[in-house]
Image (cartoon, grey):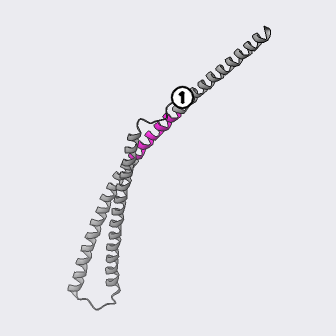
Amino acid sequence: MRKFTFDLEQVLRMKRWREEDAKKALAVEVAALEQLKSRLLELQGDLKELWDGDAQGDGPVIDHRGRLGILQYARHVGTLISGQEGDISEQGKRLKEKSDLLLKAMQERKVLEKLKERRKTEYRVERNRFEYANLDESSARYLRRLADQENSLKEEIGQ
């Protein structure tokens, strides 16, 4: 009997490649999201530092124009923070899309792997049947030979 071969092995290999590509794409999106979050924390730290420094009043006395400059900068940083939060939200959506693609690729690969295992099990059952049939045939031939030898011995003895 011939060796087991899975006809869809190339398709399974392509599904594995797609899964790997999806994993890499997901990793890129996760890294981008982490970078955006890092930048957001940095901006929030700048804003907190600005407000804390203004509230303590430790530094030199700031005139009206200086305070107005600080407020304008704080508003600018606030705008950057809200823009960064929007970017994080968009990146979260892209991350969800990549995650869904990875999940789909994993499911497709698993389906083919289960099919391969099922076919391999069917092959083993068929091979075992074939081998048992060969064993039965060999046993029957052996028993026939023994019976023939026994009959010929009986004939020789009987003559």
Residue that protrudes farthest toward the left in the picture:
65
Q: What residue sits 59% from the left and 25% below the top?
A: 134
Q: What residue sits 27% from the left and 66% below the top?
A: 83
As rendered, which of 125 and 18 lies closer to the eye? 125
As rendered, which of 123 and 45 lies closer to the eye? 123
Position of residue 55 relative to residue 125, above or below, is below
Secondary structure state at the residue bearing disc 1: helix
State the image coordinates of residue 98 (x, y, percent, origin top left): 35, 52
Residue that protrudes farthest toward the bottom in the picture:
60
Magenta segment range? 105-121
Locate residue 138 relative to residue 38 in the image: left or right. Answer: right
State the image coordinates of residue 89 (x, y, percent, origin top left): 32, 59
Residue hosting label 1: 126
Quarter location, residue 11: top left
Of helix, strand and loop, which mostly describes the magenta segment? Answer: helix
State the image coordinates of residue 115 (x, y, percent, origin top left): 46, 36
Kind of residue indicated by mark 1: Glu
State the image coordinates of residue 72 (x, y, percent, origin top left): 22, 77
Q: What residue sits 35% from the left and 71% below the top?
A: 41
Mark 1 closeness class: few <14, some 14–19, many ≥20 residues within 10 Å: few
Task: For the C terminus, give its image quadrant.
Answer: top right
Locate residue 98 relative to residue 4 in the image: left or right. Answer: left
Total count of labels: 1
